[in-house]
């Protein structure tokens, strides 16, 4: 009787618990609608003609201390919204308590020196302003093009000095549309035509036409759509032959194997992973690994100093929004058959909510890799012991203009988290008169690669800076450089002349936490909890393991580098501060670099045994090649967050091997037949 009552209570509690949202769940459709209705009676939002454009409207996350002490059985935490909005010469910052309909704060920044991201109406206004200018029409006609078949895109101008001050600008570039031939207008730039538009006044500031004589390619052979027909008209490549063990509670809390994490989409950051916890075996306590992780900024400088190109140094998260640019994933092609899809609810510029379906996918991945193994030759009976690697992937894709960025967070049962970024989409190409390398004078630097006749793929970099609030067994952590050096040995001691040794150096302040990677002066980089010792007395930790990456070679005072000073080091450590999440500053558009991670870090605050945030920048140098035309095959790189003395021993020894019925079986099939897979 008693146990039945307990069971009923448990069922009641768990149903109550699941009726509350998780306090980190993004704002719902209803909540965004409520925020809009609260705003609509608050000036200046109450005047329909002066409603500032909403550039961001999302959950104001409760303080970290409240989240850390929250349990599903606790009362719900406050549901609050944080809003940024822009009307000419005025940026608004608001916070609103949704249930009580209270405006908690409303501050304004008059004549801001940096702006929120572009909205979709900024983008369309920039294009229509450009295409209604008679000078632009004349230039287009002079190039033999039809002005009604042109696509114009606003490019962020960066900041170089007075020209970018006291007004919000876009540099508009136009492309010829050959929709009957191709959807890939990026390969048909109207080179040298550049239009500076004042976004607030809605007027053209100047028009430059410096590309007369440079042909506009007709787009032939650049289409990439299967249904477009152009691809299928060619000879198709042969098709390669062609396998959910997780739960998603309340739409965002993911439980898989020995992991538990919260996953959501954010307008600016794209995919956000929060409160990631792991344990060695079932029944053991959940142990905190990461409080919050996301791509904080994405910096893409182009390496061309000419008038039409010098300013191209995009900050895609702050200037365009990675979540805003995330489109629905293509089922079966972006993610495998066994994927679970998550929608995003975002607010439009008018504050109205809308659903962007299928922007995140989650799937269990079994690639045929080995998680661990051993065959024993020196024993009485043959031993062949092996476990397959099965992982959980959370994925989102941001299509920022021409480029597509695929973000993967992959969780392994041994506790490792792999964060991978893959790039695809179209190059930013520059038109040229050259059709063959043999025509290019020796002394003429193309600043890129001639990828096809009349098009240069311009050299550029991609830097993705991740915010990683690691909380190893709790918030108070230290950053330890495990520095490796050569130790010389004297002939009296050993026949050896040298060995490698390591020593641990705890970073005391932010300046000790700045890391430039160097193969010949190597270190491991550990985030440890000095208060949590393992069975044998090592501090519990995770290490950040870089893989192929790139560092910026630009001058530190070059304006794009100054604005993206967060790429000056590969690793930074800062003390936790809820207001320091955006490495390029809260407002990145036309920013001058005065609110970046590099500036915050100058305060040189103590970071030892404190709640700290790790920042890691994954970089790519991109020298284009012909295969990147007309659309790039994906290139990827990644880094790992790997347990280091976190578990007392390898936790996956406790995993059972797989048998026939545990994994999908796809039988081989004859030509013309459909594959026969059980269990998927
Ligand atoms: C914004 O302020 C500047 C002066 O700082 C002024 O020249 C400009 O006209 C203003 N723009 C709008 C749209 O009010
Ligand atoms: C595409 O349309 C343009 C303009 O309408 C025309 O000149 C051209 O011949 C067409 N190309 C094809 C392949 O149909
Ligand atoms: C490009 O130049 C090379 C070297 O002069 C020549 O062999 C090749 O045929 C040229 N290609 C075309 C398409 O003209
Ligand atoms: C973390 O350290 C601070 C002192 O820096 C201390 O006040 C706080 O209680 C510690 N938190 C935990 C969870 O140990
Ligand atoms: C938190 O960050 C903001 C923005 O950089 C800064 O103004 C504030 O001083 C910081 N707080 C602390 C305690 O460092
Ligand atoms: Cu690239």
Image (cartoon, rainbow, N blue to C red):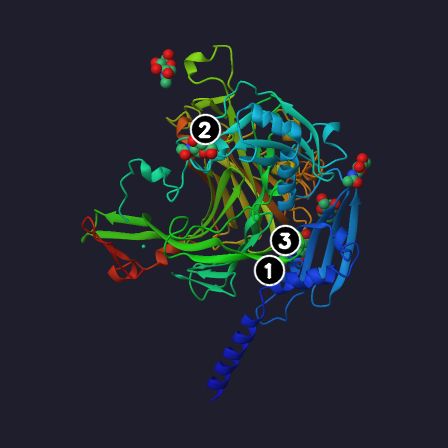
State the separation of the CA atoms marked 3 and 2: 36 Å
Q: Residue at x 66, y 51 (%)?
A: 349
- Identify the residue under disc 3: 348
Task: Specify the quarter for ligand 4.
Answer: bottom right
Residue 404 pos. (x, y %)? 49, 41
Instruction: Give whichever of 280, 352 is nearer the camera.
Output: 352
Packing grade of label 3 (10 A; few <14, some 14-19, many >=20) is some
- Identify the residue under disc 1: 24
Q: Earlier in the sequence, mark 3 or mark 1?
A: 1
Question: In this rendering, would 307 be left or right of 185?
Answer: right
- Identify the residue under disc 2: 218
Disc 1 Cβ-to-ligand 4 distance below 8 Å: no
Instruction: Give whichever of 439, 508 is nearer the camera.
Output: 439
Packing grade of label 1 (10 A; few <14, some 14-19, many >=20) is many
Secondary structure beneath disc 1? loop
Secondary structure beneath disc 3? loop
Look at the numbered discs 3 and 1 and tell me whether their residues touch, using CB distance below 8 Å: no
Look at the numbered discs 3 and 2 and tell me whether their residues touch, using CB distance below 8 Å: no
Mark nearest the camera among 3 and 2 is 2
Residue 530 pos. (x, y %)? 58, 50
Mark nearest the camera among 3 and 1 is 3
Quarter where residue 275 is shown: bottom right
Disc 2 Cβ-to-ligand 2 distance below 8 Å: no
Q: Residue furthest bottom?
A: 1
Give above or below for 587 relative to 48.
above
Give above or below for 580 relative to 217.
below
Packing grade of label 2 (10 A; few <14, some 14-19, many >=20) is some
Secondary structure beneath disc 2? loop
Q: Residue at x 54, y 76 (%)?
A: 13
Give above or below for 270 relative to 153.
below
């Amino acid at each position: 009787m008693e146990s039945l009552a307990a069971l009923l209570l448990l069922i009641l509690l768990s149903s109550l618990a699941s009726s509350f949202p998780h306090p980190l769940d993004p704002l719902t459709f209803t909540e965004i609608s409520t925020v809009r209705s609260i705003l609509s009676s608050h000036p200046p939002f109450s005047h329909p003609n002066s409603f500032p454009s909403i550039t961001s409207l999302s959950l104001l996350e409760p303080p970290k201390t409240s989240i850390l002490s929250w349990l599903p059985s606790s009362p719900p935490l406050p549901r609050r919204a944080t809003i940024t909005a822009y009307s000419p010469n005025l940026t608004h910052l608001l916070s609103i308590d949704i249930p009580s309909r209270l405006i908690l704060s409303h501050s304004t920044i008059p004549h801001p020196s940096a702006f929120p991201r572009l909205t979709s109406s900024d983008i369309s206004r920039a294009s229509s302003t450009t295409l209604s200018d008679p000078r632009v029409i004349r230039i287009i006609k002079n190039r033999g093009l039809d002005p009604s078949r042109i696509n114009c895109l606003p490019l962020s101008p960066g900041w170089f000095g007075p020209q970018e001050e006291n007004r919000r600008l876009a540099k508009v570039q136009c492309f010829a549309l050959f929709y009957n031939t191709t959807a890939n207008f990026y390969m048909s730039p109207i080179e040298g035509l550049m239009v500076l538009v004042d976004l607030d006044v809605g007027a053209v500031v100047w028009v430059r036409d410096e590309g007369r004589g440079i042909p506009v390619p007709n787009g032939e052979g650049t289409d990439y759509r299967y249904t477009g027909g152009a691809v299928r008209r060619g000879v198709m490549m042969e098709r390669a032959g062609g396998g959910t063990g997780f739960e998603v509670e309340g739409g965002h809390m993911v439980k898989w194997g020995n992991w538990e994490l919260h996953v959501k989409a954010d307008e600016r950051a794209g995919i956000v992973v929060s409160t990631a916890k792991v344990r060695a075996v079932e029944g053991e306590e959940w142990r905190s690994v990461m409080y919050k992780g996301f791509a904080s900024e994405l910096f893409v400088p182009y390496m061309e100093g000419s008038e039409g190109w010098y300013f191209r140094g995009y900050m895609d998260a702050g200037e365009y929004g990675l979540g805003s640019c995330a489109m629905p994933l293509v089922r079966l092609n972006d993610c495998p058959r066994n994927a679970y899809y998550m929608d995003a609810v975002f607010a439009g510029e008018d504050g109205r909510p809308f659903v962007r379906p299928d922007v995140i996918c989650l799937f269990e991945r079994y690639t045929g890799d080995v998680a661990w193994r051993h065959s024993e030759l020196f024993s009485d009976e043959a031993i062949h012991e092996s476990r397959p690697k099965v992982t959980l992937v959370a994925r989102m894709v941001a299509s920022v203009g021409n480029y597509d960025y695929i973000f993967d967070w992959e969780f392994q049962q041994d506790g490792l988290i792999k964060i991978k970024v893959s790039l695809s989409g179209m190059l930013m190409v520059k038109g040229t008169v050259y059709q063959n390398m043999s025509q290019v004078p020796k002394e003429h630097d193309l600043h890129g690669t001639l990828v096809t006749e009349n098009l240069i793929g311009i050299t550029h970099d991609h830097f993705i800076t991740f915010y990683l609030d690691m909380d190893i067994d709790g918030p108070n952590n230290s950053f330890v450089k495990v520095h490796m050096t050569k130790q010389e040995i004297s002939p009296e001691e050993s026949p050896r002349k040298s060995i490698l040794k390591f020593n641990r150096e705890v970073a005391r302040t932010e300046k000790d936490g700045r890391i430039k990677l160097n193969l010949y002066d190597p270190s491991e980089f550990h985030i440890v909890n000095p208060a949590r010792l393992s069975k044998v007395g090592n501090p519990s930790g995770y290490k950040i393991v870089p893989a192929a990456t790139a560092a910026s070679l630009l001058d530190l005072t070059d304006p794009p580098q100054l604005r993206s000073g967060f790429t000056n080091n590969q690793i930074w450590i800062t003390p936790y501060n809820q207001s320091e999440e955006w490495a390029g500053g809260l407002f990145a558009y036309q920013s001058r670099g005065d609110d970046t991670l590099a500036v915050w870090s100058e305060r040189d605050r103590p970071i030892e045994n404190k709640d700290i945030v790790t920042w890691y920048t994954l970089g790519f140098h991109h020298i284009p090649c012909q295969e990147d035309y007309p659309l790039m095959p994906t290139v990827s790189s990644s880094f790992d967050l790997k347990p280091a003395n976190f578990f007392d021993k390898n936790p996956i020894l406790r995993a059972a091997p797989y048998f026939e019925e545990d994994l999908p079986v796809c039988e081989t099939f004859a030509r013309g037949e459909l594959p026969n897979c059980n269990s998927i």
